Image (tube, rainbow, N blue to C red):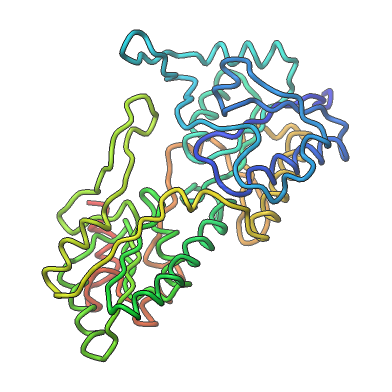
Amino acid sequence: MKAPKRIGILTGGGDCPGLNAVIRAIVKTAEHDYDMEVIGFLDGYEGLIQNRFIDLDVKDVSGILSQGGTILGTSNRADPFRFPVLQGDDYVYLDRSQEAVLNFESLGLDALIAIGGDGTMAASAGMMERGLPIVGLPKTIDNDLWGTDQTFGFDSALGTATDAIDRLQTTAQSHHRVMIVEVMGRYAGWIALGSGLAGGGDIIIIPEIPYDLDAVSRQVKQRNSLGKNFSIVVIGEGARAQGGEMVVKKRIANSPDTVRLGGIANQLAAQLEGLINIECRVTILGHLLRGGSPTAYDRILATRLGMEALHRVYNREFGKMVALQKGSLTCVPIKEVAGKLRKVTDEHPWVKTALSTGVCLGVDPDHPLDDAFVEAKS
């Protein structure tokens, strides 16, 4: 079969550090190894639907390796099968997947590289059924994409969160307070667990383990009894109390994922202050975790992934997402990735490390942890 000569790329979902690094790697590998042309669709699948794109060559990606964000722009609302269109005062949702297919064909493209998280992979799985030859690349700060051990963007977010916790340690000690740090991560606790461990958090609360308020207060009181008159609590935005619900900051009607989490730290602070008689202060890191330059690890991972995507395109291995497994790059079917989340489990080494070093995970130490994870699913 004829070798692919012209490809499109897009960045979908939330932005994260490393997106420009992967764009750069794709363009440079396309030119250096395969003499391919590359165009970049603007604002994710929205650009493919509306036929908005730019040509990309080596000079266009020069100097972007260290830049955060994405030069192509992105959108977390551009689902080709449920595309929001404002009619009067209300949004209606239209299937515009066929327009995307026609634009792809009219541009003479041989393949599409879709860079994103679970939403982008789900949309890509649908577009594959419409006949588009797609290779996926795993991106998200949340690290919750099924099929890969790590996504690019996660290490950078982890570093930003850890730096914030380091800074809060000193003010917590100085004022003898409980500092509660809320981090992103949606329904998975990777950022909270990783930054809590790296930043010396005393209590780490993740969505996978509903917290017991009494257990949290006892941990703070125990530290005080030992002369440790401050505590650092790291909590994921998707966490909830036992028997409670996740805290929803707002809902976005014209988005594939309508829920915007946020505020669980304020809820915990209000609950906790009455039990421990110590001032609790809240810091919500929010979108700070998405911004800034990628770490060296993320730059290298993104570059490796971009290069590998071109190899897969050249060999016509479509319908797959490039994944990092046990340090090596491999591929998993996009259809298997779509609709799944990779969450923290009780067997993960970080969980075992936290327990062995005396970190409270929001439940009593004698509470069987596997039971706690089961309770989270019920």
Q: Nearer the viewer, residue 178 or 82?
A: 178
Q: Position of residue 316 (x, y in %)?
A: 74, 31
Extreme left residue here? 274
Residue 371 drawn at (x, y percent): 25, 65
* Residue at the top extreme of this rendering: 88
Number of numbered tags placed on the structure image? 0
The x, y position of residue 340, in whole percent, is 43, 43
Quadrant (top left, top right, bottom left, bottom right) of the N terminus: top right
Q: Residue 103 falls in which quadrant of the image?
A: top right
Q: Quadrant of residue 214?
A: bottom left
Q: Residue furthest front?
A: 175
Horizontal and vertical percent position of residue 274: 11, 68
- Compare residues 148 and 178 and report the one nearer the observer: 178
Please indicate whether residue 52 sits to the left or right of residue 107 in the image.
left
**Residue at x-position 64% and y-position 55%:** 298
The residue at the far bottom in this view is 226
Residue drawn at (32%, 45%), measured in percent from left and top?
261
Residue at 70%, 26% in the rendered image: 8
Q: Quadrant of residue 191?
A: bottom left
Left or right for 47, reference 193 = right
Q: Is residue 123 above or below residue 374?
A: above
